[in-house]
Image: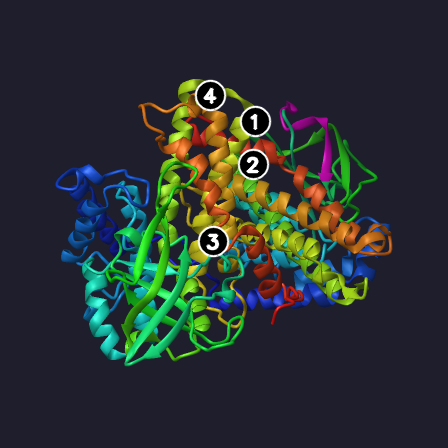
Amino acid sequence: MKLGFSPEEEAFRAECADWLICQMAGEFSDIKGITTLTAKAERRKEWEQRLAEFKWSCIGWPEQWGGRNATLAQQVIFAEEYARAGVPGRVNHIGIELAGPTILALGSDEQKQRFLPGIAAGTTIFCQGFSEPNAGSDLASVRTKGRLEAGEWVVNGQKIWTSLAHISDWIFVVTRTEEGSKGPKGLTFLMMPLDQPGIDVRGITQINGDAEFNETFLTDARCPADSLIGNVGEGWKIAMGLLAFERGVSTLGQQMAFRNELDEIVTAAKANGAANDPLIRQRIAKAEIGLRLMRYGALRMLSNNDHSKIDGAALTYKIQWATWRRNLGELAMDVLGQAGEVGEGSKYEWGTLPNLFLYSRADTIYGGTNQIQRNLIAERGLGLPREPRSDL
Amino acid sequence: MLFAFTDEQKMIAETAQTFFRDNATSARTRLAMGGDGVDRQLWSAFCTELGLAGIALPEGHGGAGLGMVEFAIVAEAAGAQVAAIPLLGLATAARAIAAGGSEEQKAEWLPRLAGGEAIAACEGVPAMAAQGSRLTGTIEFVPHGAVADMFVFVAPGKAWIVRADAPGVSVKAQVTMDQTRPFATVTLSGAEAEALDDPAAAIAAAHSGGWICLAAEALGGAQEALDRTVAYAMERVQFGRQIGSFQAYKHRLADVMVEIEQARSAVYWAACAVDENSDEAQLALHAAKSFAADTFFMAAGNMIQLHGGIGFTWEHDAHLFFKRARSIQTMLGGGNFHREQVAAMVLGEAA
């Protein structure tokens, strides 16, 4: 067990930090510090391409596909320095963290050739089409239908909460391809181009006034027959594997963004005197401790070399960070007082902390609500009986 | 960077877990609870046959020369069975001597403590009246104080060794809620004391050792409380169903697991940070002590609640966990104290 990094790794850290800071001070200074998913999307696509140009786009991937074969420690370091430098989140994070690794692991050679260079280069932006109006927590009950017709998949249905669909090029959809099948059986995982007449993307305005996610309507939407990952009927397995990729190194970058939010709260508390309140101090300490434990939980998860047991750190990570961040939003408002409830301009727009307060209500919902997480933890982590269901 | 056990550390964990599971049985712990709070047979086997008492003490003085990660592994295993042994003194008193004692003091005490020939206890006091080498004062809540052969007492900027059999030392056992680690009141009336050469180093070592020991015990206890409650949830049937199939029950247990996973990160982060002399060590120690203690209390409280009536009986072991958890929460600084230290660091105030 060792926490420290080697001199070579520290040198790598300096190299990453130098490059990132330099970029954020120079040509890309206009996007520094953006915390929302979609603001200045076009500039952020250019940023994706800049990353790729200097081989920083997907450092953990094999060199053949635009990566650096980076070690785990290097990926940890890069993710931390990325956020520390105030670089905004990746608009192609679905491509880099979900679609890419899935194609790398399960795609055909032809699919790798077709998709990976574009994902790595930041020219193929992906979004994810899982949820539907009637398939939220019960994700396996998707109704979107796909059928093969004259060498093409023809897909009909509606996806919802498709983050970033309005700025993406491709969507992967879980679709029911076996007539009459129920639940996780009979689903297929398809990759579809968004720019086609059969797909209509409409924004959904959120409680903070932004519209980062969408409804995506598929009406005779089409993609070639070889657009599926895995086999027909394996869509559930692939979608679940993909969710596991979500708990990768990117969590560490996310934590550095949380660090920036907590730092902002601390600064505000010192400025307005809230830092003298013993109860606020306790909550600041709890937030600090929670954030550190998130980091060390992620390092445990990434270092895990015992695959004979369920990885408890990984299984509990989602509910841990989501709950932590929701609490952080509430702490932010208690520190700010009523100053947190008024905006600065004439529009319904919010600074980092009030936005954190509002936005963090989504954290405990998307990617599996806290309640679903508790079911998963109880069933997979503790071996308790599964929830009964009456429709299968 | 590798935040996972090495093969050697896994072996130590397996050995320690097997030892305490097989030997620190409920029946034997209860015998100790009815006596002076020490399972002598267990303690002697731990120190001699297993040879783990000196795991983090220096090699030249009867120890194995390993670090706090290895000590935490052992403390976690002991805590899991609420073992009635004076382990804490090895983390506090013995470490204080190793860090701040003279060569003679180390040579005199460490081999005996590592070999189980002597029991050590440690406690801090706000101030102590000293006249030359003689101390006068009352020290309350000394853990396992009534069975200790020697004490390390610390006051701000000072640390002393006091022999339990020295003239002027009187020790009174206290009826203690956690009978697996009972307190004693030690009264010194001009008792002969030996000052430690480097009190600052001794105090720092006693603090870090004590906090890690308690946090690791708490982690082990929390995990065991959860595991036993899960086992009961699978076996107990009400309304024609295993009670563990009710979502209200499952979600409480899931919440416990979420806390335990964080406590595990906290304990080994702190132990690593101390071993690697990292500048995060102080923050990690305060985080680990407060977080793991609260986690244990939450797990043990749920253990009683989720067992229903049987969990409230003397016969069931749930109260052993619950009382140990409560004791750990307060010992060596309560949660609010530790979090306040963290807050001061975060807010950039000088400690």
- Would residue A208 appear left or right of A56 to someone viewing this image? right
**Looking at the picture, which amino acid does disc 2 mark?**
Leu
Image: B333 above or below A152:
above
The residue lying furthest to the top in this view is: A273
Q: How many marks?
A: 4
Label 2–label 4 contact, CB within 8 A: no
Q: Nearer the viewer, residue B256 or A102?
A: A102
Q: Chain of mark 3?
A: A
**Looking at the picture, which amino acid does disc 4 mark?**
Gln
Q: Are marks 4 and 3 on the same chain?
A: yes
**Looking at the picture, which amino acid does disc 1 mark?**
Leu
- Would residue B220 appear left or right of A282 to someone viewing this image? right
Q: Nearer the viewer, residue A215 or B350?
A: A215
Q: Coloured how?
A: rainbow
User: Residue B214, position in %: x, y?
Assistant: 62, 46
Query: Real-space Cα distance between discs 2 and 1?
Result: 38 Å
Label located before the other in sequence (4 or 1): 1
Q: Is residue B122 visible?
A: no
Residue bounds of the magenta highlight = B127-142
Q: Are marks 4 and 1 on the same chain?
A: yes
User: Residue B101, position in %: x, y?
Assistant: 54, 41
Query: Real-space Cα distance between discs 1 and 3?
Result: 26 Å
Label 3 neighbourhood size at 10 Å, few (<14), some (14-19), many (20+)?
many
Query: Real-space Cα distance between discs 3 and 2?
Result: 38 Å
Q: Which quadrant holds residue A271?
A: top left
Q: Which residue is mark 3?
A: A297
Query: Real-space Cα distance between discs 4 and 1?
Result: 18 Å
Q: Which residue is mark 1?
A: A279
Q: Are marks 3 and 2 on the same chain?
A: no
Q: Which residue is mark 2?
A: B196
Residue B131: in magenta span:
yes
| Residue A338, label in figure | 4
